[in-house]
Image (cartoon, grey):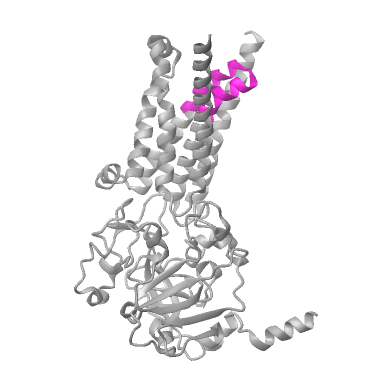
C-alpha cells in the first residue's frame, strides 16, 4: 500500500523546489539598492499579508506551513497557442535565475526592500506562445481551504481564490518577474511559495502569491481587491504619491523596520522609484486609472 | 471601617490592578523592545502598539456597558458602583491609543494628523468617540453627579453613541476581514438590545397600569 503510493508519486508528480534544487541551479547575484538598506530577512518572512492564512501580519508565518507545495502544478490557458498544465520543476527547467533587489510598497503605506530570486515574466509566458488576441494576463492563487485557514474564515469578505492581473505589456516589462526565492533561498510558504509574481512599481497586493493558474485573455479580468473595493484598490494600482487611498495618504510610507523612536517615514516615489515604466502609461490619466 | 466598606475598597483596588494588566504587559514589552528592537513588537512597533491600545479601549468600553445589565441579571444592584472605574479605564486606554497614534504613527507631524482627522472617516469617528468620552470622564465624580442631578443620567447616555462610534471606527478600518468588527459589534448590539428591550417593556407595563 505504502509502496504503491510512493511509486505513483515518483512516476508522475513534479517535486517541490528545494534548497538543493536552488543550489544546483544557481542564480546571478543582484545589486543592492544604493543608499537603501535591505530589510532583514527575519522581518520580510514574519510580517506578511497573505489573507489565505489569516489577516494578522504574523498569521502567514504561523500557518503557511499547512500548505502543501509538493507536488505543485501550474495551469496555463486562454489565448495561447500551446496551453498546458506543468509541474513546477518542468515549468522552470530552462529559465535562468537571477537576483533582483526591489522595493516592496504595500498599499497600507509601509515598505521593505527585498532581494528576490526569479526570472522575467515574459520568459515563462513566451513558452506558451500567447496569440495576437491576448491583451491581459490573469493569475490565480491556490484555493485549498483544508490547508489555508483564511479561506475557511466565515468573516472574510474575499471571494476565493485570490485573483490578480496585468496588461500584457506590463507583464512583458523587464522589471516584472516571477520569483521562486528570496534572500538566497527558495521562497518560504508565507512569502508565496513556490511561485509568485513581483511587480515592483505596483502596490504589493498586485504581486500575487502561490500561483496555480495563468490565463491570457482578450478582456480585462476581474481582480480580487478591485472587485471588493473598487474605490480603494484600482486595477492598475501603480504606486502613486499623488493619489490617496480613501482611508489614508499615499504621499509617504513607513520603511520597515521602524523603531519605537522613529516611524522611519519616507516620501513615496512615483512608480515606487521605477520611473522607467512610465512609458507604459503615456496616454493615461493616472488619477482616474489609479 | 465596617466590613462591607472594607470589602468594597479591596474589590475596587483589585479591579484597578486588573485593568492595569494590559498596560503592564505593554510596559514590559516596551522595555524588551528597547533592549532589543523587533523582539516584542515585530517590524512595525508603532502599528502593533496603537492597535493593542485601541483593542483594549474598546474591550473595556464594552465591559463598562456590561456592568448595569450584569448587576440586574445577578440582582446585585451595588455592582453598579464599579462602573465608573471601568469607564475611566476605557477612557485612559483610548487616550493612550490616540497618543500612540500621534507620537508613533504620525511622528507628531501636525500636517499628517490634522489631514487624517479631516480626511479619513475612520479616524474622524474614532476621534469623535474619544472627544465625547471627555465630558463623561470629567463628570464621573460624585460631586458632578449631584450637581447635574437628572441631567447626569441624560449626559451619560452618550456612552451608547460612543460605543457605536467605536465599532464603526473598527469596521471602517477593517480590510477584507470583518471578524473583529463582527465580534465587538455583536457584543455591543447585545448590550444595547438589552436596554431597548427593557425600555420597551417598562413602557408597555406603564401603559397597562
Q: Is residue A51 left or right of residue A261?
A: right
What residue occupies the far right of the structure in this picture?
A: A1
Q: Is residue A114 visible?
A: yes
Q: Residue, x 51% and y 37% (percent of image)?
A: B23
Residue A123 is situated, as x and y percent measured from the top left of the image, at: 41, 87
Is residue B154 one of those drawn in magenta?
no
What residue occupies the far left of the structure in this picture?
A: A283
Residue A26 is situated, as x and y percent measured from the top left of the image, at: 50, 86
Q: Quadrant of residue B20?
A: top right
Q: Residue, x 58% and y 59% (percent of image)?
A: A149
- Which range is magenta? B63-88
Q: Is residue A181 visible?
A: no
Q: Main secondary structure of the magenta part?
A: helix
Q: Is residue A96 left or right of residue A34?
A: right
Residue A105 is situated, as x and y percent measured from the top left of the image, at: 36, 64
Query: In what quadrant of the picture does the N terminus of chain A appear?
Result: bottom right
Is residue B64 one of those drawn in magenta?
yes
Amino acid at each position: 500500500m505504502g509502496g504503491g503510493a510512493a511509486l505513483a508519486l515518483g512516476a508522475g508528480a513534479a517535486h517541490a523546489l528545494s534548497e538543493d534544487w536552488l543550489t544546483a541551479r544557481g542564480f546571478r547575484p543582484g545589486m543592492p539598492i544604493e543608499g537603501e538598506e535591505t530589510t532583514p530577512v527575519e522581518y520580510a518572512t514574519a510580517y506578511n499579508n497573505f489573507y489565505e492564512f489569516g489577516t494578522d501580519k504574523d498569521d502567514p508565518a504561523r500557518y503557511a506551513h499547512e500548505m502543501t507545495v509538493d507536488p505543485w502544478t501550474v495551469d496555463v490557458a486562454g489565448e495561447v497557442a500551446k496551453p498546458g498544465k506543468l509541474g513546477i520543476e518542468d515549468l522552470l527547467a530552462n529559465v535562468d535565475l537571477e537576483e533582483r533587489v526591489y522595493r516592496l510598497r504595500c498599499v497600507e503605506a509601509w515598505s521593505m526592500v527585498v532581494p528576490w530570486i526569479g526570472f522575467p515574466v515574459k520568459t515563462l509566458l513566451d513558452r506558451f506562445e500567447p496569440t495576437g488576441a491576448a491583451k491581459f494576463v490573469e493569475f490565480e492563487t491556490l484555493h485549498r481551504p483544508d490547508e489555508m485557514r483564511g479561506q475557511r474564515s466565515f468573516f472574510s469578505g474575499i471571494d476565493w481564490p485570490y485573483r490578480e492581473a496585468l496588461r500584457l505589456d506590463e507583464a512583458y516589462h523587464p522589471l516584472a518577474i516571477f520569483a521562486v526565492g528570496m534572500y538566497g533561498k527558495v521562497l518560504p510558504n508565507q512569502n508565496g511559495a513556490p511561485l509568485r509574481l513581483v511587480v515592483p512599481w505596483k502596490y504589493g497586493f498586485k504581486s500575487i502569491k502561490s500561483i496555480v493558474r495563468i490565463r491570457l485573455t482578450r478582456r480585462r479580468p476581474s481582480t480580487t481587491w478591485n472587485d471588493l473595493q473598487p474605490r480603494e484598490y484600482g486595477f492598475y494600482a501603480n504606486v502613486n504619491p499623488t493619489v490617496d487611498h480613501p482611508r489614508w495618504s499615499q504621499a509617504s510610507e513607513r520603511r520597515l523596520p521602524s523603531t519605537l523612536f522613529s516611524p522611519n517615514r519616507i516620501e513615496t516615489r512615483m512608480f515606487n522609484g521605477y520611473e522607467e515604466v512610465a512609458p507604459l502609461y503615456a496616454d493615461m490619466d493616472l488619477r482616474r486609472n489609479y | 471601617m465596617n466590613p462591607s466598606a472594607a470589602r468594597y475598597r479591596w474589590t475596587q483596588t483589585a479591579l484597578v490592578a486588573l485593568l492595569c494588566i494590559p498596560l503592564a504587559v505593554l510596559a514590559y514589552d516596551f522595555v524588551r523592545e528597547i533592549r532589543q528592537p523587533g523582539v516584542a513588537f515585530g517590524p512595525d512597533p508603532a502599528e502593533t502598539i496603537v492597535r493593542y491600545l485601541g483593542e483594549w479601549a474598546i474591550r473595556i468600553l464594552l465591559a463598562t456597558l456590561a456592568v448595569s445589565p450584569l448587576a440586574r441579571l445577578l440582582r446585585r444592584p451595588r455592582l453598579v458602583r464599579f462602573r465608573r472605574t471601568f469607564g475611566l479605564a476605557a477612557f485612559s486606554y483610548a487616550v493612550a491609543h490616540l497618543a500612540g497614534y500621534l507620537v508613533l504613527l504620525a511622528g507628531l507631524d501636525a500636517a499628517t494628523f490634522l489631514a487624517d482627522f479631516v480626511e479619513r472617516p475612520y479616524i474622524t469617528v474614532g476621534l469623535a468617540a474619544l472627544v465625547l468620552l471627555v465630558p463623561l470622564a470629567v463628570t464621573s465624580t460624585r460631586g458632578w453627579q449631584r450637581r447635574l442631578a437628572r441631567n447626569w443620567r441624560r449626559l451619560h447616555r452618550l456612552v451608547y453613541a460612543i460605543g457605536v462610534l467605536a465599532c464603526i471606527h473598527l469596521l471602517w478600518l477593517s480590510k477584507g476581514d470583518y471578524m473583529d468588527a463582527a465580534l465587538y459589534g455583536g457584543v455591543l448590539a447585545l448590550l444595547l438590545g438589552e436596554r431597548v428591550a427593557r425600555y420597551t417593556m417598562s413602557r408597555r407595563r406603564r401603559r397597562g397600569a
